[in-house]
Amino acid sequence: MADQGGIGHLREFDPTTADWSIFKKRMENYFVANNIVDDKRKSAILLNILNEEAYKLLYNLCLPVEPENKTYAELIPLLSEHFKPSVTVFAARYKFYNSRKSASESPKEWAARVKQLAVLCEFENNQLDFVLRDHFIIAYDKGRVQDRLFEEKKSITLKEAVDLAESKSAAQPSSFSSSSGDQQIEVKKEPAVYHPRAKSTHAAEKKPADPTQVVYSQTMSSVNPTAPQISYRQYRIQLLHREQQEGHDRRM
Protein backbone atom coordinates (compact mmCIF):
# COMPACT_ATOMS: atom_id res chain seq x y z
CA MET A 1 0.00 0.00 0.00
CA ALA A 2 1.07 3.60 -0.55
CA ASP A 3 0.59 6.48 1.87
CA GLN A 4 -1.73 4.74 4.30
CA GLY A 5 -2.47 8.06 6.00
CA GLY A 6 -3.66 9.74 2.80
CA ILE A 7 -7.02 9.84 1.07
CA GLY A 8 -7.86 6.44 -0.35
CA HIS A 9 -5.27 3.82 -1.16
CA LEU A 10 -3.67 2.09 -4.13
CA ARG A 11 -3.72 -1.67 -4.52
CA GLU A 12 -0.70 -3.56 -5.81
CA PHE A 13 -0.60 -3.67 -9.60
CA ASP A 14 -0.72 -7.21 -11.03
CA PRO A 15 -0.32 -7.21 -14.84
CA THR A 16 -2.03 -10.60 -15.15
CA THR A 17 -5.32 -9.40 -13.67
CA ALA A 18 -5.36 -5.58 -13.73
CA ASP A 19 -5.98 -3.19 -16.61
CA TRP A 20 -3.07 -0.77 -16.80
CA SER A 21 -5.07 2.07 -18.35
CA ILE A 22 -7.59 1.92 -15.49
CA PHE A 23 -4.89 1.51 -12.86
CA LYS A 24 -2.97 4.50 -14.24
CA LYS A 25 -6.04 6.76 -14.01
CA ARG A 26 -6.73 5.67 -10.42
CA MET A 27 -3.11 6.34 -9.49
CA GLU A 28 -3.20 9.83 -11.01
CA ASN A 29 -6.41 10.59 -9.12
CA TYR A 30 -4.74 9.39 -5.94
CA PHE A 31 -1.89 11.83 -6.52
CA VAL A 32 -4.34 14.70 -7.03
CA ALA A 33 -6.44 13.79 -3.97
CA ASN A 34 -3.35 13.70 -1.76
CA ASN A 35 -1.67 16.73 -3.35
CA ILE A 36 1.34 14.71 -4.50
CA VAL A 37 3.15 16.73 -7.15
CA ASP A 38 6.81 15.87 -6.61
CA ASP A 39 8.06 13.75 -9.52
CA LYS A 40 10.48 11.77 -7.38
CA ARG A 41 7.77 10.91 -4.86
CA LYS A 42 5.40 9.83 -7.65
CA SER A 43 8.12 7.57 -9.05
CA ALA A 44 8.75 5.99 -5.63
CA ILE A 45 5.03 5.30 -5.13
CA LEU A 46 4.74 3.76 -8.61
CA LEU A 47 7.70 1.42 -8.05
CA ASN A 48 6.32 0.48 -4.62
CA ILE A 49 2.88 -0.61 -5.87
CA LEU A 50 4.18 -2.83 -8.70
CA ASN A 51 4.17 -6.53 -7.82
CA GLU A 52 7.29 -8.59 -8.48
CA GLU A 53 6.36 -9.53 -12.05
CA ALA A 54 5.44 -5.95 -12.94
CA TYR A 55 8.68 -4.61 -11.45
CA LYS A 56 10.75 -7.15 -13.42
CA LEU A 57 8.96 -6.08 -16.57
CA LEU A 58 9.65 -2.39 -15.94
CA TYR A 59 13.26 -3.18 -15.02
CA ASN A 60 13.76 -4.86 -18.41
CA LEU A 61 12.05 -1.99 -20.22
CA CYS A 62 14.41 0.50 -18.59
CA LEU A 63 17.67 -1.30 -19.41
CA PRO A 64 20.45 -0.32 -19.35
CA VAL A 65 19.22 2.23 -16.78
CA GLU A 66 17.55 1.10 -13.56
CA PRO A 67 13.95 2.25 -12.93
CA GLU A 68 15.01 4.15 -9.80
CA ASN A 69 17.18 6.38 -11.97
CA LYS A 70 14.33 7.40 -14.25
CA THR A 71 11.71 10.03 -13.58
CA TYR A 72 8.00 9.35 -13.22
CA ALA A 73 7.42 11.11 -16.55
CA GLU A 74 9.86 8.64 -18.17
CA LEU A 75 8.48 5.49 -16.52
CA ILE A 76 4.79 5.99 -17.36
CA PRO A 77 5.22 6.03 -21.19
CA LEU A 78 7.24 2.78 -21.03
CA LEU A 79 4.44 0.95 -19.23
CA SER A 80 1.69 2.56 -21.32
CA GLU A 81 3.35 1.55 -24.57
CA HIS A 82 3.91 -2.01 -23.37
CA PHE A 83 0.31 -2.48 -22.21
CA LYS A 84 -1.20 -0.73 -25.19
CA PRO A 85 -3.99 -2.93 -26.61
CA SER A 86 -3.08 -4.61 -29.88
CA VAL A 87 -6.69 -4.69 -31.09
CA THR A 88 -7.18 -2.84 -34.38
CA VAL A 89 -9.91 -0.25 -34.83
CA PHE A 90 -11.99 -2.34 -37.20
CA ALA A 91 -11.71 -5.43 -34.99
CA ALA A 92 -12.95 -3.33 -32.07
CA ARG A 93 -15.80 -1.92 -34.16
CA TYR A 94 -16.75 -5.40 -35.34
CA LYS A 95 -17.04 -6.49 -31.72
CA PHE A 96 -18.98 -3.31 -30.89
CA TYR A 97 -21.56 -3.63 -33.66
CA ASN A 98 -22.06 -7.36 -33.09
CA SER A 99 -22.74 -7.01 -29.38
CA ARG A 100 -26.31 -7.56 -28.19
CA LYS A 101 -28.04 -6.87 -24.92
CA SER A 102 -28.70 -10.04 -22.94
CA ALA A 103 -32.02 -10.60 -21.18
CA SER A 104 -30.26 -10.63 -17.80
CA GLU A 105 -28.76 -7.15 -18.27
CA SER A 106 -30.51 -4.07 -16.96
CA PRO A 107 -30.74 -1.03 -19.28
CA LYS A 108 -28.01 0.75 -17.29
CA GLU A 109 -25.72 -2.28 -17.42
CA TRP A 110 -26.25 -2.55 -21.18
CA ALA A 111 -25.49 1.16 -21.64
CA ALA A 112 -22.27 0.80 -19.62
CA ARG A 113 -21.18 -2.16 -21.75
CA VAL A 114 -21.89 -0.26 -24.96
CA LYS A 115 -19.66 2.59 -23.75
CA GLN A 116 -16.92 0.18 -22.72
CA LEU A 117 -16.96 -1.56 -26.11
CA ALA A 118 -16.61 1.80 -27.85
CA VAL A 119 -13.37 2.72 -26.06
CA LEU A 120 -11.08 1.19 -28.71
CA CYS A 121 -13.29 2.03 -31.69
CA GLU A 122 -11.90 5.56 -32.10
CA PHE A 123 -15.23 7.10 -33.07
CA GLU A 124 -15.13 10.83 -33.77
CA ASN A 125 -16.15 12.92 -30.77
CA ASN A 126 -19.00 14.58 -32.67
CA GLN A 127 -20.37 11.15 -33.63
CA LEU A 128 -19.82 9.19 -30.42
CA ASP A 129 -23.07 10.16 -28.66
CA PHE A 130 -25.18 9.23 -31.69
CA VAL A 131 -23.35 5.94 -32.24
CA LEU A 132 -23.78 4.93 -28.59
CA ARG A 133 -27.46 5.87 -28.59
CA ASP A 134 -28.21 4.07 -31.86
CA HIS A 135 -26.49 0.86 -30.81
CA PHE A 136 -28.13 0.94 -27.38
CA ILE A 137 -31.56 0.96 -29.04
CA ILE A 138 -30.93 -1.22 -32.11
CA ALA A 139 -29.09 -3.98 -30.22
CA TYR A 140 -31.59 -3.99 -27.34
CA ASP A 141 -33.19 -7.41 -26.81
CA LYS A 142 -36.47 -7.78 -28.69
CA GLY A 143 -39.68 -7.07 -26.81
CA ARG A 144 -41.96 -4.30 -25.59
CA VAL A 145 -39.12 -2.09 -24.38
CA GLN A 146 -37.36 -2.07 -27.74
CA ASP A 147 -40.68 -1.53 -29.53
CA ARG A 148 -41.25 1.53 -27.33
CA LEU A 149 -37.73 2.83 -28.02
CA PHE A 150 -38.34 2.50 -31.76
CA GLU A 151 -41.25 4.93 -31.42
CA GLU A 152 -38.97 7.76 -30.24
CA LYS A 153 -37.76 10.60 -32.45
CA LYS A 154 -34.14 10.78 -33.58
CA SER A 155 -33.54 13.68 -31.20
CA ILE A 156 -33.64 11.39 -28.16
CA THR A 157 -30.35 11.27 -26.24
CA LEU A 158 -28.64 8.19 -24.85
CA LYS A 159 -29.52 9.21 -21.29
CA GLU A 160 -33.17 9.68 -22.22
CA ALA A 161 -33.22 6.29 -23.95
CA VAL A 162 -31.72 4.60 -20.88
CA ASP A 163 -34.22 6.31 -18.55
CA LEU A 164 -37.12 5.32 -20.80
CA ALA A 165 -35.94 1.71 -20.96
CA GLU A 166 -35.59 1.65 -17.17
CA SER A 167 -39.13 2.91 -16.61
CA LYS A 168 -40.65 0.53 -19.17
CA SER A 169 -38.72 -2.44 -17.76
CA ALA A 170 -39.98 -1.69 -14.27
CA ALA A 171 -43.58 -1.45 -15.54
CA GLN A 172 -43.54 -4.83 -17.26
CA PRO A 173 -45.50 -7.52 -15.38
CA SER A 174 -43.30 -10.25 -14.04
CA SER A 175 -43.81 -13.79 -15.24
CA PHE A 176 -43.12 -15.01 -11.74
CA SER A 177 -44.52 -14.04 -8.39
CA SER A 178 -42.49 -14.37 -5.21
CA SER A 179 -43.68 -14.09 -1.64
CA SER A 180 -40.84 -15.74 0.26
CA GLY A 181 -37.93 -15.44 -2.12
CA ASP A 182 -38.83 -18.56 -4.10
CA GLN A 183 -40.24 -18.30 -7.58
CA GLN A 184 -43.80 -19.53 -7.86
CA ILE A 185 -45.30 -20.41 -11.21
CA GLU A 186 -49.03 -20.00 -11.63
CA VAL A 187 -50.46 -23.16 -13.18
CA LYS A 188 -53.79 -23.07 -14.95
CA LYS A 189 -56.12 -25.72 -13.60
CA GLU A 190 -57.88 -27.74 -16.25
CA PRO A 191 -61.48 -28.92 -15.56
CA ALA A 192 -61.78 -32.55 -14.56
CA VAL A 193 -62.94 -34.85 -17.34
CA TYR A 194 -65.25 -37.78 -16.49
CA HIS A 195 -64.29 -41.02 -18.17
CA PRO A 196 -67.07 -43.68 -17.92
CA ARG A 197 -65.76 -47.07 -16.93
CA ALA A 198 -65.91 -49.57 -19.74
CA LYS A 199 -68.11 -52.55 -19.08
CA SER A 200 -66.27 -55.77 -18.62
CA THR A 201 -66.44 -57.94 -21.68
CA HIS A 202 -66.50 -60.95 -19.39
CA ALA A 203 -69.55 -59.66 -17.53
CA ALA A 204 -71.32 -58.85 -20.77
CA GLU A 205 -70.77 -62.30 -22.18
CA LYS A 206 -73.54 -64.79 -21.29
CA LYS A 207 -72.55 -68.29 -20.44
CA PRO A 208 -74.07 -70.96 -22.69
CA ALA A 209 -77.17 -72.51 -21.16
CA ASP A 210 -76.99 -76.00 -19.66
CA PRO A 211 -78.96 -78.40 -21.96
CA THR A 212 -80.50 -80.12 -18.95
CA GLN A 213 -81.67 -76.81 -17.61
CA VAL A 214 -83.29 -76.01 -20.95
CA VAL A 215 -85.11 -79.37 -21.06
CA TYR A 216 -86.21 -78.99 -17.46
CA SER A 217 -87.52 -75.49 -18.07
CA GLN A 218 -89.47 -76.56 -21.14
CA THR A 219 -90.90 -79.65 -19.34
CA MET A 220 -92.09 -77.69 -16.33
CA SER A 221 -93.68 -75.06 -18.55
CA SER A 222 -95.61 -77.69 -20.50
CA VAL A 223 -96.79 -79.57 -17.38
CA ASN A 224 -97.88 -76.63 -15.32
CA PRO A 225 -97.22 -73.13 -16.63
CA THR A 226 -98.26 -71.62 -13.29
CA ALA A 227 -96.12 -73.93 -11.14
CA PRO A 228 -93.64 -72.20 -8.87
CA GLN A 229 -90.05 -72.17 -10.11
CA ILE A 230 -87.79 -74.74 -8.39
CA SER A 231 -84.19 -75.73 -8.89
CA TYR A 232 -83.21 -78.50 -11.21
CA ARG A 233 -81.85 -80.55 -8.30
CA GLN A 234 -85.17 -80.34 -6.50
CA TYR A 235 -86.95 -81.34 -9.68
CA ARG A 236 -84.76 -84.47 -10.04
CA ILE A 237 -85.43 -85.46 -6.42
CA GLN A 238 -89.17 -85.06 -6.90
CA LEU A 239 -89.06 -87.05 -10.15
CA LEU A 240 -87.12 -89.89 -8.52
CA HIS A 241 -89.49 -89.97 -5.59
CA ARG A 242 -92.49 -90.14 -7.94
CA GLU A 243 -90.98 -93.05 -9.88
CA GLN A 244 -90.35 -94.96 -6.66
CA GLN A 245 -93.94 -94.35 -5.53
CA GLU A 246 -95.36 -95.57 -8.87
CA GLY A 247 -93.24 -98.75 -8.69
CA HIS A 248 -94.49 -99.43 -5.18
CA ASP A 249 -98.11 -99.01 -6.28
CA ARG A 250 -97.67 -101.49 -9.13
CA ARG A 251 -96.33 -104.15 -6.77
CA MET A 252 -99.34 -103.72 -4.59
Image (cartoon, helix red, strand yellow):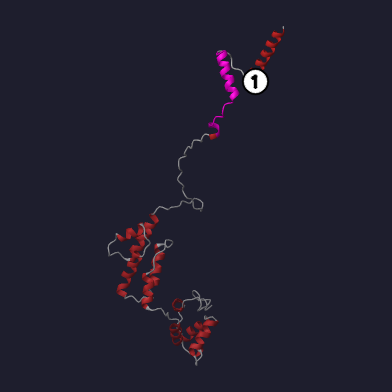
* Residue 220 visible in the snapshot: yes
Q: Work out whether residue 71 or residue 115 is closer to the camera in this orientation and state it.
A: 115
Q: Residue at x 31, y 61 (%)?
A: 150
Q: Is residue 186 magenta?
A: no
Q: Quadrant of residue 94?
A: bottom left
Q: Is residue 126 above or below residue 57?
A: above
- Residue 20 % position (x, y): 46, 78
Quarter of the rendering containing residue 229: top right
Q: Nearer the viewer, residue 131 or 58?
A: 131
Residue 192: where, in percent of width, then height?
47, 39
Question: Farthest residue in the front direction?
Answer: 251
Q: Secondary structure at mark 1?
A: helix
Q: Is residue 173 above or below residue 58?
A: above
- The quarter of the rendered structure image containing the N terminus is bottom right
Q: In front: 29, or 247? A: 247
Position of 237 compared to 55: left or right? right
Residue 36 placement (x, y as % from top left): 46, 81
**Most prominent secondary structure in the magenta stretch?**
helix
Above or below 101: residue 6: below
Q: Which residue is mark 1?
A: 233
Determine the residue located farthest toward the bottom in the rendered image: 64
Q: Amino acid at mark 1?
A: Arg
Q: Which residues are magenta?
A: 202-225
Residue depicted at 41% across the width and 65% down the height: 109
